[in-house]
Amino acid sequence: MTMQPAIRRPTRRAEGGFTLLEVLIALVVLSIGLLGLAALQATSLQFNQSANVRSQATQLAYDLADRMRANRDAALAGAYDGVGFAAEPPACAVSPQPGGSIANQDIAQWRNALACGLPAGTGAVTRNGEMVTITVRWDDSRGERPPEQFAVTTRL
């Protein structure tokens, strides 16, 4: 009888840690991916909020232009001229109590809407004949950039 040499099979003890190592590497890769996804979500929310504020600024600028067109004679006479950026952004009032002319009421309501709708929102109006430039400024930087600005020039 001839004896064949025994084939050694690997023991389970030698392979025991390899699967655990694979699981740990997979967890590291998954956690890096999830952190990247969370950062992407945070950036997306920040850009979405900035776009929302810019849309509000645009709407408020066109709102004053429409008010000026509705009160065109007074606007051409200079009733809306001289509205400049406030040194300090105005505080949001629950219901402003403007007095005087329609132009004064429009400006007071517009400034209040800027203060209530935009972070540190303020605005300015300059007129050159029938052309008027309405500029809205707000702070959307979270302390990282200078204030944002939107300007629209239109004919009354």
Image: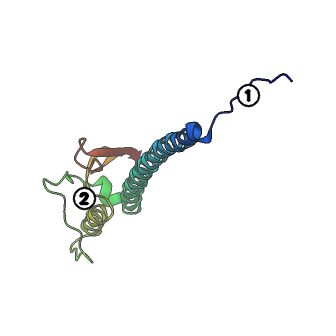
Q: Nearer the viewer, residue 74 or 12?
A: 12
Read off the residue under disc 2: 79
Classify residue 153 as left or right of residue 122. Answer: right
Above or below: residue 7 compared with residue 70: above
Q: Nearer the viewer, residue 56 or 77?
A: 56
Using a 10 Å C-alpha cutoff, classify the residue at mark 1 as few (fewer than 14 neighbours), some (14 to 19) or many (20 or more).
few
- How crowded pointer 2 is (Cα within 10 Å; few <14, some 14-19, many 20+) is rated as some
Mark number, residue 6: 1
Residue at image x 45%, y 50%?
Answer: 38
For the residues marked 2 and 1, what is the alpha-carbon distance in whole angstroms?
A: 106 Å
The one nearer the camera, 69 or 24, is 24
Measured as percent of width and height from the top left, residue 23 is found at 54, 44
**Can residue 156 be spotted in the picture?**
no
- Residue 138: give x, y in percent of width and height: 28, 51
Q: Residue at x 43, y 53 (%)?
A: 45
Q: List x then y, in percent, for residue 140.
A: 30, 50
> Relative to residue 68, is residue 92 depicted above or below?
below
Q: Quadrant of residue 86?
A: bottom left
- Please give the name of the residue rendered at 44% of the width and 46% of the height, measured from the top-left corner: 35
Amino acid type at image mark 2: Ala
Q: Are marks 2 and 1 in contact (CB under 8 Å)?
A: no
Hey, what amino acid is under mark 1?
A: Ala
Q: Secondary structure at mark 2?
A: loop
Mark 2 or mark 1, whichever is nearer to me: 1
- Quarter of the image with the N terminus is top right
Residue 93 in picture, x, y percent from top left: 23, 73
